[in-house]
Image (spheres, rainbow, N blue to C red):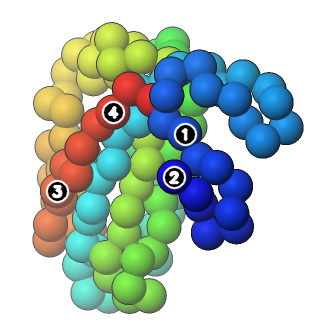
Amino acid sequence: MRGWNGVILSMERGSINPDRSRIPPMHVILWRFRARPGREAEFEAAYGDDGVWVRLFRTGQGFLGSRADARNGRDVYLTIDRWVSEDAYRSVSRSAGRRATRRSTPAAQALTTEETLLGAVEA
């Protein structure tokens, strides 16, 4: 498969980047959220690069990073969470006493009207 810039893309474990370096295997989780109208800035702060969820995820081992991007320019966002493994993700979720959902807290529910797990993959 080719990306928008013509570079060959691969989701195979341990595949090779265009610069010939190895991509380490990882567990990737994709979520879609709809922010409550008028609360988009608060959502971006909570779900962004240094938001409450990223800080929580950093408390455990194996967290590689998270990214939240607006999809329709208004209230729909995609987040991509990256972990060294599914076990690492589940360990942090269990230790935090939360289900594997970001809307499990009243504060999170106040910022969103929808949360959809789009999928997870070992890449």
CA distance for labels 1 and 4: 13 Å
Residues at marks 1 and 2 touching, judged by CB atoms closer than 8 Å: yes
Residues at marks 4 and 2 touching, judged by CB atoms closer than 8 Å: no
Residue shown at 24% from the left, 73% from the top: 34
CA distance for labels 3 and 4: 15 Å
Numbered disc in front, either 1 or 4: 1
Q: Earlier in the sequence, mark 4 or mark 2?
A: 2
Q: Which residue is mark 3?
A: 116
Q: Earlier in the sequence, mark 3 or mark 4?
A: 3
Residue 96 pos. (x, y %): 28, 22
Label number found at residue 10: 1
Q: Which residue is mark 4?
A: 121
Secondary structure of the residue carrying tag 3 is: strand
Residue 95 pos. (x, y %): 29, 14
Task: Residue 57: tell me if it is visible.
Answer: no
Residues at marks 3 and 4 touching, judged by CB atoms closer than 8 Å: no
Q: Which residue is mark 2?
A: 1
Is 71 in front, or is 123? 123
Residue shown at 29% from the left, 53% from the top: 31
Residues at marks 3 and 2 touching, judged by CB atoms closer than 8 Å: no
Residue shown at 54% from the left, 39% from the top: 10
Binning the other alpha carbons within 10 Å of mark 3 as few (below 14), some (14 to 19) or many (20 upward) gives some
Q: Amino acid at mark 3?
A: Thr
Give above or below for 26 relative to 80: above
Binning the other alpha carbons within 10 Å of mark 1 as few (below 14), some (14 to 19) or many (20 upward) gives some
Residue shown at 38% from the left, 85% from the top: 72
Q: Earlier in the sequence, mark 1 or mark 2?
A: 2
Secondary structure of the residue carrying tag 2 is: loop
Secondary structure of the residue carrying tag 1 is: loop
